[in-house]
Structures are given as C-alpha cells and as structure tokens.
Image (cartoon, rainbow, N blue to C red):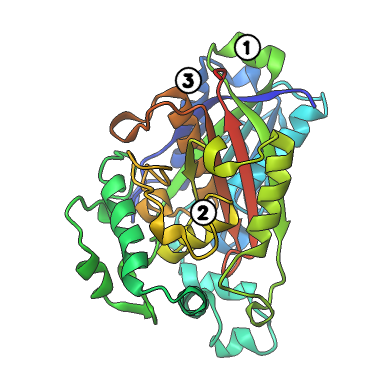
Amino acid sequence: MDKVGIVGYNQVKLYSDANYGRYEMIFEAVRGALDNAGLKKKDITTVISATNDYYDGRTISNCFTVEVGGGYLADESKVEMDGAHAMLYGLMRILSGNHKLAVVWGGSMPSCYPYHSARLYETDPTWERPNAYVNDVTASGFQMRAYMDKYDIGAEYIANIAVKNRKNAAKNPLALEEAQNSNITVDEVLNSDAYSDPVTELMVAQPCDGVAAVLLAPERQALKITDKPVWISGVGWNQDTYYIGERDLSTCTSMELAAKQAYDMANINDAKNDIDVAELHEAYAHEEMIFTECLGLAEKGEARKLNTSIGGDLPINPSGGAMGGKPPCATGLIRVIEAVKQIRGEAGDYQVDGVNRAVATGQIGMCAQNNIVWVLEGGGE
C-alpha cells in the first residue's frame, strides 16, 4: 500500500453555544487546515464531510456546506458518521490514485438542536423510539454497570478517569471551557447529578459546537508539502449488533476487532510497548477504561491499574479526550488531530515526551456500537 500522510490540520475552539454561524465554523476549520499546510483552495481535489441530516434538520444537508468546506469545483461527498470514519473515505480516495489532496472535515452545532432527542432515531421505531426507555442516556448506565459488575470495580475508579481528563482539558486552549477544571475532585464527580445510574453528569462527555479538518496526501505530495508529515500506518473498523441486550457491555467487541485489523496493518504485536500515546473517543468516563483494555493497552479488568496521566506509563487522552468537549461528527477526527499534534511535538502544555507512534479512535452508536481505530506514526524510529 502506498503511504498516505496527514499534512495539515485545524480545529476551531469548542463552545457550548458558539454564537456564530455554522458555515463560518466550517470555513474557519478548512481554511485553517490549508493555512497550516501552506496550501491554497486550488490544491484541493476532493472533500469529504462528516455531518448528520438528523442533526442538521434537513436531508442532503451537505449541499449547503460545499462552498465553505472547500468543495466548490472539486469532488465532494459526505459520510453520515464521525469525522474519523470520514477520514477512511478520504484515505480510500487518495489510495485510488485519483486524488492528490483530500480535505476531511466534520462537525455539528448541538446548541441548535436537541441532541439526545435526535439520537432517538438510532433506536427501533416500533417499540424503543416511542417509549424512549432505551436510549443513549439509559444505555450508558447499562454499560457502566456491566463493566463494574464484571470486574468488581468501584465507581471511584471511573470518577478518576473523569478527573484526569478534565484536568488535562484545562491545559488545552481549544477544549470546552465548561469541561476544563484543574481543581476537580473524585468526590465532586461522584456527587454530581445523576445521569443514568451509576453514571453521573461529570462522567459524561458534553455535546458542544465544533468543527475540525485534516488534509491527506500521498507520499510524494506529502513530502513536498511538509517536512513532518504524520503517516497512516494502520486503520481498522468494525460494527457490533445494534441491540445492546445481545451484547456483552462489559467489553467492546467492535473495538477489539477494529484494533486487530489496525495493528495487523501497522505490524504492531505488543500494543502496550509499541504505542506511545492514545487519544480515545470516550463518550463516558467508563468507556476509556473499556477501550484501553480492548486496544490491548491493559489486561481485561486491569485498566484501573494503568497510570495514564501525561507523564504516566501510557498517556491516554492528554488533550482531555471527549471529556474536554464532544462535538457530534467531529470528536473522533479531533482525536486524530490530537494524536498528530503529539507526534509533531505541537501539543503545548499537554505534550507527551518522545511520541512517535499514536493510536486514535472514533465511535458512533449506543454503547460504542461502531468503532474505528487509526495508528499514526512520525518519521522517526
């Protein structure tokens, strides 16, 4: 397979209510990614957007974002998933040999629509949707309870993840301000309002307004654009069954299978020692622990013993992860961008020392039904 590199990126700051136009945010993200790479609009050959018609409130919603997203007079398409999934489409277009620069952007503005109500459309229309007993909120409680019961884990361990990520987010100037808290404590997390027992409000990644963009190019073009491209060495994706009652929620099979595919492509045999940093799309604090184990970074039930702080054994979500803000359709793409920053040494106050290989993930669906895993590498050894 030809090498494909990430040659530019940009993320707008996250807001609970951005208070300016969505199209302005898209333009800012894409224009900023081009500026980051020293490129112009004419260099774009294909654009992949990640949006959702349910979130946007109209069908074929990308038809209104073509110009501001860089797609005018260029090949353009949409992926109705996370931006991390849209990047897979961009990768395939580059590998086809038909395109030399792919723009991949994703984002949404949940300040303009009822996020949790929109997600009811993920559920069965005959029973679950009209009754709304099973939804993304209640499912999170089932998932956390299943993990705690399986491995006899107390809620304080999961609260520790929320504390770590919100403290990390305080170092990230692009994170949601409401999510930044350098003084947060485990007791505060445990005593925050009930979300869906045993999940509390401060264990939840808050939906917010945001857009992010990355640029992909084949090796020859990538090396002309930048002297520090970040190479895609592996990618894997998988989808589990929709019905959460048919899944073992104490683990995440789709993540395990996606990781295996990505690791095989990247020739990774020992993830614990081969990965320097991980940026995981955790919709809830307990998901970071589940994903850590499914990625082979810790044994099953042992994630609580791993030091994942910025200076720890294996830093996970040094940017704050999704706990630092979760813009629908952009959260996984931001995880990719944060991994790129770490590899290029551009993460500022939350930079991890000596990063050459990173893993980033994206998810969609209730209880992380569908996962995508990216393995990214710098030019060093």
Q: At 56% from the left edge and 48% from the top edge, which residue is drawn?
A: 361
Instruction: Classify 10 Å Cα crowding around label 3: few (below 14), some (14-19), many (20 and above).
Output: some
x then y, percent, for residue 140: 48, 74
Which residue carries the number 3 mark?
35
x then y, percent, for residue 259: 66, 49
- The Cα–Cα distance between marks 3 and 1, rounded to whole angstroms, is 16 Å
Q: Nearer the viewer, mark 2 or mark 3?
A: 2
Please say if 67 is above or below 153. Answer: above
Q: Nearer the viewer, residue 109 or 243?
A: 243
Q: At 59% from the left edge and 67% from the top edge, which residue is drawn?
A: 251
Please say if 219 is above or below 105. Answer: above
Quadrant containing the N terminus is: top right
Image mark for residue 362: none
Q: Nearer the viewer, mark 3 or mark 1?
A: 1
Give the image quarter of residue 368: bottom right
- The Cα–Cα distance between marks 2 and 3, rounded to whole angstroms, is 39 Å
Image mark for residue 298: 2
Give the image quarter of residue 5: top right
x then y, percent, for residue 155: 35, 73
Residue 264 in sight: yes
Amino acid type at mark 3: Asp
- Label 3 residue SS: helix
Which residue carries the number 1 mark?
223
